[in-house]
Amino acid sequence: MHVHRLGLVLAALTACGPDGRADATDTATAPTGTTAPASTSSSSSGDVAPTSTGDASTGTITTTTTGTTEEPGTTTALTTAVDTSTTEPVDPSTTTTVGPKLDLPAEMPIPVKDIPGLVSITFYESTSGVMEFTFSVDGPELNTLLADPLSNANRDIEGTSVEFYDVYYSDVDGVFDPLGSYLTIAGSFGAKLPAGGGLNLAEISLNFDNNEFEFGSFLASFVGLGDNYIAGSEPNAIDNNLDTHTTMGNTVDTPGQRLRVTLGFKSSLMPG
């Protein structure tokens, strides 16, 4: 065994007899404030039960583990020295170092309709110039998912005669949820090229009782379809500019699907 401290070597030599084996009549004493491995011996011919010795006031504890019989009448047990700042034995194999814990608040999004002071929501659609469609926070439009197919008699917003949209509270994927933290506009447009693509969303605004408003801050998810869909136009819905808009395409060849844009807002996703 190699020991890196001179004091420990001297202590170990003191504990050994002439033949280098531990002498039952000798004891090894570690200097105060240091920890040294010690060897013990027993006249038992069986296994040795673990024992602990040492001075708790110095923080040095020697733990003896089970040994094996090497010669008749002599049992040698290995010992391990452990430094501890407590008065109880410590198993170093189970010691875990834990870093400082940061006291950070958990993400707690709230339903859009529960945003303090919110009274209405406006969708800015740019089919022919910017048109505003405003709905009450507790109104039926935002709290109801319309069944397909959308039509002039079954829509929340109408652009052209072949363009109909449903608006509602949702989750991040645009799935209807009356307690959702996101807002979704989804719908159908029945014209392919050379017509321009449909669902031209400029912005969505939250309107508060103090006459302030908030545009969307996060592009959560979207669906673009058809030959007149302009991929990459989606961020126009959150650029705070009513002169730009999305172009999400058409549903002529996919009547079972909807064009869609879903936005998130700081007031619901990062309340406070």
Image (cartoon, helix red, strand yellow):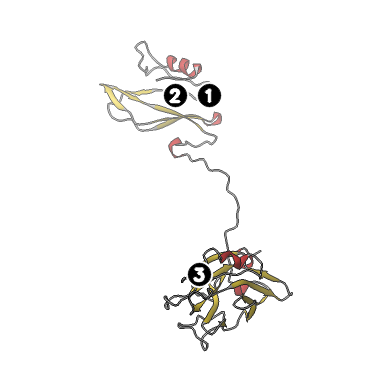
- Name which quarter of the figure residue 254 lies in: bottom left
Residue 152 in the image: above or below residue 229: below
Relative placement, left or right, of 58 versus 75 is right
Q: Classify the position of the N terminus by image quarter.
A: top left
Q: Earlier in the sequence, mark 2 or mark 3?
A: 2
Identify the residue at horizontal 69%, vertical 71% (top origin): 213
The picture places residue 119, in percent across and down from the top left corner, at 67, 78
Real-space Cα separation, disc 1 to disc 2, in angstroms: 10 Å
Q: Is residue 177 above or below residue 219?
A: below
Q: Is residue 55 left or right of residue 42?
A: right
Q: Choose between 134 and 191: the one closer to the eye.
A: 191
The amino acid at mark 3 is Tyr
In the rendered structure, the answer to whether residue 131 lies left or right of residue 256 reads right
Ranked by sequence position, the earlier of labels 3 and 1 is 1
Marking on residue 37: 2
**Who is closer to the viewer here, 113 or 153?**
153
Identify the residue position indicated by label 1 in the image. Answer: 34
